[in-house]
Image (cartoon, rainbow, N blue to C red):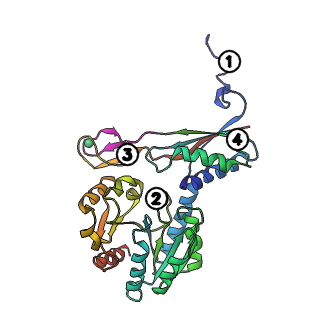
Amino acid sequence: MPHAHPHDHDQVRDAPSGGGETITLEQRVLGKNEELAARNRSWLAERDIVAVNLMSSPGAGKTTLLERTVRDLTGRRRPVAVIEGDQETTLDAERIRRAGGAVVQVNTGAGCHLDAEMVQGALTTLAPDGGSLVLVENVGNLVCPALFDLGERSRAVIISVTEGTDKPLKYPYMFAVADLVIINKVDLLPYVDFDTDQCVRYARSVNPDLRVLTLSATTGEGLDDWYDWLDARS
Amino acid sequence: MHELSITQSIVDAVCERADGRPVRTVRIRVGILTAVVPDSMRFCFDLTTAGTVAEGAQLEIDQPPGTAHCRACEKDFALPDLVLLCPCGSADVAITSGQELQIVSMRVG
Ligand SMILES: [Zn+2]
């Protein structure tokens, strides 16, 4: 081999620009969260607990929907408990408590999403009865929560007709990981410029399997479909 | 800014493997179809490595492009965003790259 390069062999371990050892990791960045999520998932399954992760931007009416859901479902179907993720306040948790739900608040501080470890801690504190429905209210934004598996059974994204029709195209990651889209505040449709069919087309362009429900947490219109969907998770 | 917690988990993993040795370079793979912004990661990397064995390390980011396979026409095609539509008109497609989020390697010593 007349042209063999003197440091070909060194390049196997060392970068040509001098010293050091290259260590191959090839590991998933979110691997630790995914392991914890899998642990949550089996913990929940062993107790026949159904957890649903609710995600939205601020102002979509998520807390109002939760409050109404807790009030309507308490004593009628599975016991309902709520994990309330919020950056600072406990105001939302108090609203849920007044509606009759068992609730635990997770303050994420600067954090913009819940992760599997926070949910594990919240479940331990909440100690939901076997057979419960646990609704997880994620921190209000449509990007960060999309990346973190919590160990939930299903994921619902809530948007409202006061937001742009093109929300699914602006936040495709969130719609890609969701099982259900709830379009809330449909009682306001006569007053706003929102094209429901177009919004649904956009959402399905990133996730063809998405279920879509339209409802108003304020008037109660369409809520039975939401409760039927929750029942079908069981 | 989920980039902060994501970058923190990278730095934790890297420092653990470095086992006390100084880290010079960290190479990661961030597909363009993930909701992770490389510039934010660089900013967070400098913040989260401060005071660790990876302080001053260089972050190298590979960005695999988005590609998909169409189940209708059996062709592979480029996918610039998450709108799942083959040029043939079918939406029955599977993403084959662009969603990677991995720590590839690091250089220590
Ligand atoms: Zn095709």
Would you say B74 lies left or right of A145 here? Answer: left
Asked if the residues shown at circle 1 and circle 4 are in contact, with their CB atoms under 8 angstroms apart, the answer is no
Q: Amino acid at mark 1?
A: Pro
Q: Amino acid at mark 2?
A: Ala
Q: Secondary structure at mark 3?
A: loop
Mark 4 — residue? Answer: B56
Quadrant of the displayed image that contains ligand 1? top left
Front residue (pair A74, A110)? A110
Mark 3 Cα within 10 Å, few/some/many (few <14, many 20+)? some
Q: Which mark is residue A113?
A: none
Asked if the residues shown at circle 1 and circle 3 are in contact, with their CB atoms under 8 angstroms apart, the answer is no
Give the spatial CA distance, label 2 vs label 4.
Answer: 30 Å
Point out the frontmost of discs 1 and 2: 2
Mark 2 — residue? Answer: A146
Instruction: Judge if badges 4 and 3 mark residues of a common chain.
Output: yes
Magenta residues, as a range? B64-79
Whether the residue carrying mark 1 lies under 8 Å from ligand 1 is answered with no
Q: Position of residue A38 (x, y in %)?
A: 52, 64
Instruction: Judge if badges 1 and 4 mark residues of a common chain.
Output: no
